[in-house]
Image (tube, helix red, strand yellow):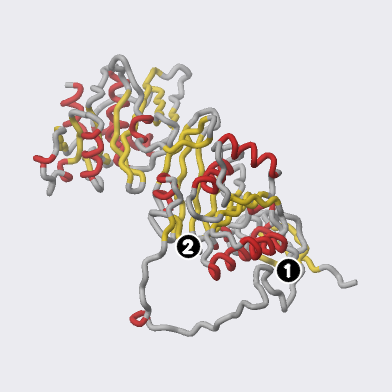
Amino acid sequence: MAKAKSSYFCQSCGYESAKWLGKCPSCSQWNTFVEEIVEKSSAKVPSWKTSSSTHRSNVPSQVSTIVSSTEKRLSTSDQELDRVLGGGLVTGSVTLIGGEPGIGKSTLMLQLALNIENKKVLYISGEESEQQIKMRAERITSTPRADCYILTETSTQNIFKQIEILEPEIIIVDSIQTLHSAHIDSTPGSVSQVRECTAELLRFAKETDTPVFLIGHITKDGAIAGPKILEHMVDTVLQFEGDRHHVYRILRSIKNRFGAAAEMGIYAMNSTGLREVSNPSEILLSQRDEELSGIAISATLEGARPMLIETQALVSIAAYGTPQRSATGFDTRRMNMLLAVLEKRCGFKLSTRDVFLNIAGGIKVEDPAIDLAIIVAIISSHEDIPVSSKNCFAAEVGLSGEIRAVNRIDQRILEAQKLGFDKIFVSKFNLKGLVMEKYSIEVIGISKIEDVLSILFG
Protein backbone atom coordinates (compact mmCIF):
# COMPACT_ATOMS: atom_id res chain seq x y z
CA MET A 1 0.00 0.00 0.00
CA ALA A 2 1.42 3.39 -1.03
CA LYS A 3 2.26 5.75 1.77
CA ALA A 4 -0.13 8.69 2.04
CA LYS A 5 1.47 11.99 1.20
CA SER A 6 0.80 15.03 3.33
CA SER A 7 1.52 18.73 2.95
CA TYR A 8 1.05 21.81 5.08
CA PHE A 9 -1.27 24.58 3.89
CA CYS A 10 -1.71 28.13 5.16
CA GLN A 11 -5.35 28.62 6.15
CA SER A 12 -5.11 32.32 5.33
CA CYS A 13 -3.68 32.36 1.79
CA GLY A 14 -3.39 28.69 0.77
CA TYR A 15 0.43 28.61 0.59
CA GLU A 16 1.73 25.02 0.44
CA SER A 17 4.81 23.83 2.32
CA ALA A 18 6.47 20.44 2.74
CA LYS A 19 6.91 21.07 6.48
CA TRP A 20 5.21 23.01 9.21
CA LEU A 21 6.18 26.68 9.47
CA GLY A 22 5.42 29.11 12.25
CA LYS A 23 5.13 32.10 9.91
CA CYS A 24 3.71 31.96 6.39
CA PRO A 25 6.25 33.26 3.82
CA SER A 26 3.41 34.43 1.56
CA CYS A 27 1.02 36.37 3.81
CA SER A 28 3.25 36.71 6.97
CA GLN A 29 0.53 35.30 9.23
CA TRP A 30 1.54 33.27 12.29
CA ASN A 31 0.33 29.75 13.26
CA THR A 32 -1.86 29.29 10.20
CA PHE A 33 -0.37 26.06 8.79
CA VAL A 34 -2.38 22.84 9.01
CA GLU A 35 -1.43 19.37 7.80
CA GLU A 36 -3.58 17.81 5.08
CA ILE A 37 -3.30 14.52 3.24
CA VAL A 38 -2.95 15.06 -0.48
CA GLU A 39 -2.90 12.68 -3.41
CA LYS A 40 -1.17 14.08 -6.47
CA SER A 41 -1.55 12.40 -9.82
CA SER A 42 0.43 13.44 -12.85
CA ALA A 43 -2.29 12.24 -15.19
CA LYS A 44 -5.23 13.79 -13.39
CA VAL A 45 -8.12 14.65 -15.69
CA PRO A 46 -10.71 17.19 -14.52
CA SER A 47 -13.89 15.40 -13.49
CA TRP A 48 -16.10 17.59 -15.68
CA LYS A 49 -14.20 16.80 -18.88
CA THR A 50 -15.75 14.33 -21.30
CA SER A 51 -13.87 12.11 -23.71
CA SER A 52 -14.93 14.30 -26.63
CA SER A 53 -13.52 17.54 -25.17
CA THR A 54 -10.29 18.80 -26.67
CA HIS A 55 -7.60 21.14 -25.46
CA ARG A 56 -6.52 23.87 -27.81
CA SER A 57 -3.12 25.38 -27.50
CA ASN A 58 -3.09 29.17 -27.18
CA VAL A 59 -0.57 31.32 -29.02
CA PRO A 60 0.49 34.93 -28.32
CA SER A 61 -1.54 37.66 -30.05
CA GLN A 62 -0.82 41.33 -30.63
CA VAL A 63 -3.12 43.71 -28.76
CA SER A 64 -3.93 45.52 -32.02
CA THR A 65 -5.14 42.29 -33.66
CA ILE A 66 -7.46 41.21 -30.84
CA VAL A 67 -11.12 41.80 -31.66
CA SER A 68 -12.93 43.35 -28.70
CA SER A 69 -16.48 42.32 -27.99
CA THR A 70 -19.03 43.29 -25.36
CA GLU A 71 -19.64 40.58 -22.81
CA LYS A 72 -23.04 38.91 -22.97
CA ARG A 73 -25.19 39.68 -19.96
CA LEU A 74 -28.27 37.89 -18.68
CA SER A 75 -30.95 39.62 -16.64
CA THR A 76 -31.58 37.87 -13.33
CA SER A 77 -35.09 39.41 -12.93
CA ASP A 78 -33.70 41.07 -9.79
CA GLN A 79 -32.88 44.75 -10.30
CA GLU A 80 -30.76 45.00 -7.15
CA LEU A 81 -28.68 41.94 -8.03
CA ASP A 82 -28.28 43.14 -11.63
CA ARG A 83 -27.07 46.51 -10.32
CA VAL A 84 -24.45 44.93 -8.04
CA LEU A 85 -23.26 42.58 -10.80
CA GLY A 86 -22.70 45.57 -13.09
CA GLY A 87 -25.77 45.30 -15.31
CA GLY A 88 -26.54 41.60 -15.34
CA LEU A 89 -25.00 38.16 -15.18
CA VAL A 90 -22.02 37.57 -17.49
CA THR A 91 -21.83 34.18 -19.21
CA GLY A 92 -18.97 32.04 -17.96
CA SER A 93 -18.48 34.12 -14.81
CA VAL A 94 -17.97 32.70 -11.32
CA THR A 95 -19.55 34.70 -8.48
CA LEU A 96 -18.77 34.12 -4.81
CA ILE A 97 -21.34 35.27 -2.21
CA GLY A 98 -20.36 35.43 1.46
CA GLY A 99 -22.27 36.35 4.57
CA GLU A 100 -23.08 35.44 8.15
CA PRO A 101 -25.17 32.33 8.93
CA GLY A 102 -28.90 33.01 8.65
CA ILE A 103 -28.48 36.33 6.84
CA GLY A 104 -30.34 35.10 3.72
CA LYS A 105 -27.70 33.87 1.23
CA SER A 106 -29.57 30.66 0.39
CA THR A 107 -32.88 32.52 0.15
CA LEU A 108 -31.39 35.06 -2.27
CA MET A 109 -29.95 32.35 -4.53
CA LEU A 110 -33.12 30.25 -4.43
CA GLN A 111 -35.14 33.32 -5.42
CA LEU A 112 -32.78 33.78 -8.35
CA ALA A 113 -33.26 30.14 -9.38
CA LEU A 114 -37.06 30.41 -9.14
CA ASN A 115 -37.51 33.81 -10.78
CA ILE A 116 -35.03 33.95 -13.66
CA GLU A 117 -36.86 33.48 -16.95
CA ASN A 118 -36.18 31.06 -19.80
CA LYS A 119 -33.09 29.57 -18.16
CA LYS A 120 -32.50 26.06 -16.87
CA VAL A 121 -31.06 26.42 -13.35
CA LEU A 122 -29.40 23.71 -11.25
CA TYR A 123 -29.35 24.42 -7.50
CA ILE A 124 -26.77 22.20 -5.80
CA SER A 125 -27.09 21.95 -2.02
CA GLY A 126 -24.66 20.20 0.28
CA GLU A 127 -26.28 21.50 3.47
CA GLU A 128 -30.04 20.96 3.13
CA SER A 129 -32.32 18.18 1.96
CA GLU A 130 -34.70 18.42 -0.98
CA GLN A 131 -37.66 18.69 1.41
CA GLN A 132 -36.12 21.68 3.21
CA ILE A 133 -35.45 23.48 -0.06
CA LYS A 134 -39.00 22.66 -1.24
CA MET A 135 -40.46 24.25 1.92
CA ARG A 136 -38.46 27.43 1.35
CA ALA A 137 -39.44 27.51 -2.32
CA GLU A 138 -43.14 27.26 -1.41
CA ARG A 139 -42.73 30.17 0.98
CA ILE A 140 -41.04 32.28 -1.70
CA THR A 141 -43.44 31.51 -4.56
CA SER A 142 -46.66 29.56 -4.91
CA THR A 143 -45.86 28.42 -8.47
CA PRO A 144 -42.28 27.07 -8.71
CA ARG A 145 -40.73 27.07 -12.19
CA ALA A 146 -40.37 23.79 -14.05
CA ASP A 147 -36.83 24.71 -15.18
CA CYS A 148 -35.43 24.84 -11.63
CA TYR A 149 -33.71 21.61 -10.59
CA ILE A 150 -32.47 20.67 -7.10
CA LEU A 151 -29.50 18.35 -6.50
CA THR A 152 -28.36 17.37 -3.00
CA GLU A 153 -24.79 16.17 -3.51
CA THR A 154 -21.31 16.98 -2.21
CA SER A 155 -19.05 14.95 -4.52
CA THR A 156 -17.83 17.00 -7.48
CA GLN A 157 -17.51 13.83 -9.58
CA ASN A 158 -21.20 13.01 -9.14
CA ILE A 159 -22.17 16.66 -9.61
CA PHE A 160 -20.44 16.92 -12.99
CA LYS A 161 -22.06 13.65 -14.13
CA GLN A 162 -25.49 15.17 -13.47
CA ILE A 163 -24.45 18.41 -15.15
CA GLU A 164 -23.50 16.52 -18.33
CA ILE A 165 -26.93 14.86 -18.35
CA LEU A 166 -29.01 17.97 -17.46
CA GLU A 167 -26.93 20.65 -19.27
CA PRO A 168 -28.07 23.58 -17.08
CA GLU A 169 -27.57 27.20 -18.13
CA ILE A 170 -26.93 28.53 -14.59
CA ILE A 171 -25.43 26.66 -11.62
CA ILE A 172 -25.74 27.58 -7.94
CA VAL A 173 -23.60 25.81 -5.30
CA ASP A 174 -24.62 26.02 -1.63
CA SER A 175 -21.98 25.97 -0.28
CA ILE A 176 -18.45 25.61 -1.65
CA GLN A 177 -17.14 24.49 1.78
CA THR A 178 -19.33 21.36 1.69
CA LEU A 179 -18.01 20.00 -1.62
CA HIS A 180 -15.19 17.49 -1.88
CA SER A 181 -13.15 16.15 -4.79
CA ALA A 182 -11.80 12.60 -5.03
CA HIS A 183 -8.52 14.01 -6.31
CA ILE A 184 -7.72 15.45 -2.86
CA ASP A 185 -7.62 13.12 0.11
CA SER A 186 -8.68 15.58 2.81
CA THR A 187 -11.88 16.56 4.57
CA PRO A 188 -14.48 18.90 2.98
CA GLY A 189 -13.93 22.52 3.90
CA SER A 190 -10.15 22.21 4.14
CA VAL A 191 -7.89 24.60 2.26
CA SER A 192 -6.93 22.10 -0.43
CA GLN A 193 -10.50 20.86 -0.95
CA VAL A 194 -11.99 24.36 -1.27
CA ARG A 195 -9.25 25.38 -3.69
CA GLU A 196 -9.56 22.22 -5.84
CA CYS A 197 -13.38 22.27 -6.00
CA THR A 198 -13.38 25.95 -6.93
CA ALA A 199 -10.74 25.34 -9.60
CA GLU A 200 -12.84 22.54 -11.16
CA LEU A 201 -15.97 24.72 -11.22
CA LEU A 202 -13.95 27.63 -12.60
CA ARG A 203 -12.55 25.55 -15.48
CA PHE A 204 -16.02 24.23 -16.23
CA ALA A 205 -17.55 27.76 -16.26
CA LYS A 206 -14.89 29.21 -18.56
CA GLU A 207 -14.95 26.42 -21.14
CA THR A 208 -18.74 26.01 -21.28
CA ASP A 209 -19.77 29.70 -20.77
CA THR A 210 -22.02 28.67 -17.88
CA PRO A 211 -22.45 31.20 -15.02
CA VAL A 212 -21.73 29.71 -11.60
CA PHE A 213 -22.72 31.09 -8.19
CA LEU A 214 -20.81 29.90 -5.12
CA ILE A 215 -22.11 30.50 -1.60
CA GLY A 216 -19.27 30.74 0.92
CA HIS A 217 -19.11 30.66 4.70
CA ILE A 218 -17.35 33.43 6.61
CA THR A 219 -15.04 33.37 9.61
CA LYS A 220 -15.63 35.12 12.93
CA ASP A 221 -13.65 38.09 11.57
CA GLY A 222 -16.11 38.50 8.70
CA ALA A 223 -13.76 37.22 5.96
CA ILE A 224 -14.79 34.45 3.59
CA ALA A 225 -13.64 31.11 4.98
CA GLY A 226 -10.95 29.19 3.12
CA PRO A 227 -7.77 30.37 1.45
CA LYS A 228 -7.53 34.00 0.36
CA ILE A 229 -6.68 32.76 -3.13
CA LEU A 230 -10.35 31.74 -3.42
CA GLU A 231 -11.33 35.41 -3.82
CA HIS A 232 -8.62 35.90 -6.45
CA MET A 233 -9.80 32.92 -8.50
CA VAL A 234 -13.43 34.00 -8.94
CA ASP A 235 -14.63 36.89 -11.12
CA THR A 236 -16.97 38.56 -8.63
CA VAL A 237 -17.08 38.63 -4.83
CA LEU A 238 -20.30 39.79 -3.15
CA GLN A 239 -20.83 40.33 0.56
CA PHE A 240 -24.31 39.91 2.06
CA GLU A 241 -24.58 42.04 5.20
CA GLY A 242 -27.22 42.95 7.72
CA ASP A 243 -28.47 42.43 11.23
CA ARG A 244 -30.68 39.39 11.77
CA HIS A 245 -32.73 41.47 14.21
CA HIS A 246 -33.58 43.99 11.45
CA VAL A 247 -35.40 43.43 8.18
CA TYR A 248 -32.93 45.17 5.85
CA ARG A 249 -30.11 43.36 4.06
CA ILE A 250 -27.29 44.93 2.03
CA LEU A 251 -25.57 43.20 -0.89
CA ARG A 252 -22.16 44.78 -1.58
CA SER A 253 -19.77 44.22 -4.46
CA ILE A 254 -16.22 43.77 -3.13
CA LYS A 255 -14.63 42.64 -6.40
CA ASN A 256 -16.07 42.67 -9.91
CA ARG A 257 -14.13 42.07 -13.11
CA PHE A 258 -17.15 43.06 -15.21
CA GLY A 259 -18.36 46.19 -13.40
CA ALA A 260 -17.85 48.65 -10.57
CA ALA A 261 -16.55 47.23 -7.31
CA ALA A 262 -18.48 49.64 -5.07
CA GLU A 263 -22.10 48.94 -5.96
CA MET A 264 -24.73 48.15 -3.36
CA GLY A 265 -28.19 46.57 -3.41
CA ILE A 266 -30.74 46.75 -0.57
CA TYR A 267 -33.34 44.13 0.32
CA ALA A 268 -36.03 43.81 2.96
CA MET A 269 -36.52 40.37 4.53
CA ASN A 270 -40.12 39.33 5.05
CA SER A 271 -42.14 36.12 5.35
CA THR A 272 -42.07 35.53 1.60
CA GLY A 273 -38.33 36.02 1.12
CA LEU A 274 -36.27 39.06 0.11
CA ARG A 275 -38.00 42.09 -1.34
CA GLU A 276 -36.09 44.61 -3.45
CA VAL A 277 -35.86 48.15 -2.06
CA SER A 278 -35.79 50.46 -5.08
CA ASN A 279 -35.57 53.74 -3.10
CA PRO A 280 -33.24 53.25 -0.10
CA SER A 281 -33.36 56.92 0.90
CA GLU A 282 -36.92 56.50 2.16
CA ILE A 283 -35.97 53.71 4.58
CA LEU A 284 -32.78 55.42 5.78
CA LEU A 285 -34.60 58.63 6.74
CA SER A 286 -36.70 58.36 9.88
CA GLN A 287 -40.12 59.95 10.02
CA ARG A 288 -40.31 62.54 12.84
CA ASP A 289 -43.25 64.52 14.18
CA GLU A 290 -41.02 67.30 15.49
CA GLU A 291 -37.52 68.67 14.95
CA LEU A 292 -34.89 67.05 17.19
CA SER A 293 -31.34 68.12 17.92
CA GLY A 294 -28.36 65.98 16.93
CA ILE A 295 -29.74 64.91 13.53
CA ALA A 296 -28.46 65.90 10.08
CA ILE A 297 -29.08 64.46 6.61
CA SER A 298 -26.21 63.68 4.25
CA ALA A 299 -26.26 63.03 0.50
CA THR A 300 -23.89 60.10 -0.12
CA LEU A 301 -23.01 57.78 -2.97
CA GLU A 302 -22.67 54.00 -2.91
CA GLY A 303 -21.19 53.04 -6.25
CA ALA A 304 -23.37 54.82 -8.80
CA ARG A 305 -26.40 55.08 -6.49
CA PRO A 306 -27.09 58.34 -4.64
CA MET A 307 -28.65 57.98 -1.20
CA LEU A 308 -29.73 60.30 1.57
CA ILE A 309 -28.95 58.96 5.01
CA GLU A 310 -29.54 60.23 8.51
CA THR A 311 -26.60 60.87 10.86
CA GLN A 312 -27.39 60.96 14.57
CA ALA A 313 -25.08 62.40 17.23
CA LEU A 314 -25.33 62.60 21.01
CA VAL A 315 -22.97 64.84 22.99
CA SER A 316 -23.14 64.69 26.80
CA ILE A 317 -20.97 65.46 29.82
CA ALA A 318 -18.44 62.70 30.56
CA ALA A 319 -19.80 61.06 33.70
CA TYR A 320 -16.81 58.79 34.38
CA GLY A 321 -13.91 61.16 33.86
CA THR A 322 -12.57 59.75 30.61
CA PRO A 323 -14.71 60.84 27.62
CA GLN A 324 -16.18 58.05 25.52
CA ARG A 325 -16.02 58.00 21.71
CA SER A 326 -18.31 55.54 19.95
CA ALA A 327 -19.42 55.36 16.30
CA THR A 328 -21.80 52.89 14.65
CA GLY A 329 -21.56 52.64 10.87
CA PHE A 330 -18.70 55.14 10.65
CA ASP A 331 -14.94 55.08 11.20
CA THR A 332 -14.22 56.07 14.82
CA ARG A 333 -10.78 57.42 13.91
CA ARG A 334 -12.26 59.80 11.37
CA MET A 335 -14.85 60.93 13.91
CA ASN A 336 -12.02 61.74 16.36
CA MET A 337 -10.34 63.75 13.61
CA LEU A 338 -13.51 65.78 13.01
CA LEU A 339 -13.85 66.41 16.76
CA ALA A 340 -10.26 67.70 16.84
CA VAL A 341 -11.04 70.05 13.94
CA LEU A 342 -14.09 71.43 15.78
CA GLU A 343 -12.06 72.03 18.93
CA LYS A 344 -9.04 73.56 17.21
CA ARG A 345 -10.68 75.61 14.45
CA CYS A 346 -14.09 76.47 15.91
CA GLY A 347 -13.40 76.62 19.65
CA PHE A 348 -15.88 73.98 20.81
CA LYS A 349 -14.63 72.28 23.98
CA LEU A 350 -15.45 68.65 23.27
CA SER A 351 -12.49 67.03 25.03
CA THR A 352 -14.55 66.64 28.22
CA ARG A 353 -17.69 65.37 26.47
CA ASP A 354 -18.92 61.93 25.54
CA VAL A 355 -19.67 61.72 21.82
CA PHE A 356 -21.80 58.97 20.29
CA LEU A 357 -22.44 58.72 16.57
CA ASN A 358 -24.89 56.50 14.70
CA ILE A 359 -25.70 56.06 11.01
CA ALA A 360 -29.42 55.31 10.82
CA GLY A 361 -30.56 52.16 9.03
CA GLY A 362 -27.68 49.97 10.15
CA ILE A 363 -25.44 50.64 7.13
CA LYS A 364 -21.72 51.43 7.01
CA VAL A 365 -20.62 54.58 5.20
CA GLU A 366 -17.12 55.37 3.89
CA ASP A 367 -18.02 58.30 1.65
CA PRO A 368 -16.08 61.41 2.83
CA ALA A 369 -19.05 63.58 1.77
CA ILE A 370 -20.73 62.66 5.07
CA ASP A 371 -18.18 64.74 7.06
CA LEU A 372 -20.17 67.97 7.01
CA ALA A 373 -23.40 66.28 8.15
CA ILE A 374 -21.55 64.65 11.06
CA ILE A 375 -20.11 67.96 12.21
CA VAL A 376 -23.52 69.64 11.98
CA ALA A 377 -25.14 66.79 13.95
CA ILE A 378 -22.47 67.01 16.69
CA ILE A 379 -22.83 70.79 17.08
CA SER A 380 -26.63 70.47 16.98
CA SER A 381 -26.52 68.03 19.89
CA HIS A 382 -23.87 70.05 21.76
CA GLU A 383 -25.88 73.27 21.53
CA ASP A 384 -29.24 71.44 21.71
CA ILE A 385 -30.45 73.32 18.63
CA PRO A 386 -32.32 71.26 16.00
CA VAL A 387 -31.44 71.48 12.31
CA SER A 388 -34.29 71.75 9.83
CA SER A 389 -35.24 68.37 8.34
CA LYS A 390 -35.44 70.11 4.94
CA ASN A 391 -31.68 70.75 4.91
CA CYS A 392 -29.07 68.25 3.73
CA PHE A 393 -25.28 68.28 3.40
CA ALA A 394 -22.68 66.91 0.98
CA ALA A 395 -19.08 67.98 1.56
CA GLU A 396 -15.76 66.77 2.95
CA VAL A 397 -14.05 68.57 5.83
CA GLY A 398 -10.28 69.11 5.87
CA LEU A 399 -7.94 69.41 8.85
CA SER A 400 -7.75 73.19 8.52
CA GLY A 401 -11.54 73.46 8.65
CA GLU A 402 -11.99 74.03 4.92
CA ILE A 403 -14.97 72.53 3.07
CA ARG A 404 -13.69 70.35 0.25
CA ALA A 405 -15.48 69.40 -2.96
CA VAL A 406 -16.84 65.87 -3.54
CA ASN A 407 -17.43 63.94 -6.76
CA ARG A 408 -20.68 63.64 -8.71
CA ILE A 409 -22.36 66.50 -6.91
CA ASP A 410 -25.03 66.70 -9.60
CA GLN A 411 -26.44 63.28 -8.68
CA ARG A 412 -26.49 64.18 -5.00
CA ILE A 413 -28.38 67.42 -5.63
CA LEU A 414 -30.96 65.74 -7.86
CA GLU A 415 -31.57 63.02 -5.25
CA ALA A 416 -32.14 65.63 -2.54
CA GLN A 417 -34.44 67.54 -4.86
CA LYS A 418 -36.43 64.41 -5.67
CA LEU A 419 -37.06 63.73 -1.99
CA GLY A 420 -38.36 67.24 -1.33
CA PHE A 421 -35.48 68.96 0.45
CA ASP A 422 -35.33 72.76 0.38
CA LYS A 423 -31.58 73.38 0.80
CA ILE A 424 -28.36 71.47 0.25
CA PHE A 425 -25.01 72.69 1.59
CA VAL A 426 -22.01 71.89 -0.64
CA SER A 427 -18.47 73.17 -1.14
CA LYS A 428 -18.30 76.38 -3.13
CA PHE A 429 -15.73 74.68 -5.37
CA ASN A 430 -18.48 72.25 -6.46
CA LEU A 431 -20.51 75.15 -7.90
CA LYS A 432 -18.22 75.55 -10.91
CA GLY A 433 -19.95 74.23 -14.00
CA LEU A 434 -23.33 73.65 -12.32
CA VAL A 435 -26.40 75.01 -14.12
CA MET A 436 -28.44 76.34 -11.20
CA GLU A 437 -31.53 76.97 -13.35
CA LYS A 438 -32.30 73.23 -13.60
CA TYR A 439 -32.54 72.83 -9.81
CA SER A 440 -35.61 73.72 -7.80
CA ILE A 441 -33.64 73.12 -4.57
CA GLU A 442 -31.50 75.92 -3.13
CA VAL A 443 -27.79 75.05 -3.46
CA ILE A 444 -25.62 76.85 -0.89
CA GLY A 445 -21.86 76.94 -1.45
CA ILE A 446 -19.59 77.31 1.59
CA SER A 447 -15.82 77.30 2.06
CA LYS A 448 -15.29 77.01 5.85
CA ILE A 449 -16.99 75.28 8.77
CA GLU A 450 -17.62 78.66 10.37
CA ASP A 451 -19.83 79.64 7.40
CA VAL A 452 -22.27 76.75 7.76
CA LEU A 453 -22.33 77.03 11.57
CA SER A 454 -23.15 80.74 11.41
CA ILE A 455 -25.98 80.08 8.94
CA LEU A 456 -27.50 77.23 10.96
CA PHE A 457 -26.82 78.22 14.57
CA GLY A 458 -26.18 81.97 14.39
Look at mark 2 in the image and give the residue it sits on.
91
Q: Residues within 10 Å of mark 1 (few under 14, many from 20)?
A: few
Q: Nearer the viewer, mark 1 or mark 2?
A: 2
Give residue 358's quadrant in the image: top left
**Is residue 256 left or right of 3 when viewed as pictured?**
left
Q: Residues within 10 Å of mark 2 (few under 14, many from 20)?
A: some
Q: Amino acid at mark 1?
A: Ala
In the rendering, at what x and y percent does residue 158 appear?
A: 72, 61
Q: Earlier in the sequence, mark 1 or mark 2?
A: 1
Give residue 171's quadrant in the image: bottom right
Residue at the extreme right of the image, as rendered: 1
Label tally: 2
Mark 2, secondary structure of its residue: loop
Which image quarter holds the N terminus? bottom right
In the rendering, at what x and y percent does residue 85 appear?
A: 43, 53
Q: Which mark is residue 18?
A: 1
In the rendering, at what x and y percent does residue 341 appear?
A: 29, 35
Answer above or below: position of 223 versus 271.
below
Tell me if residue 341 can be seen: yes
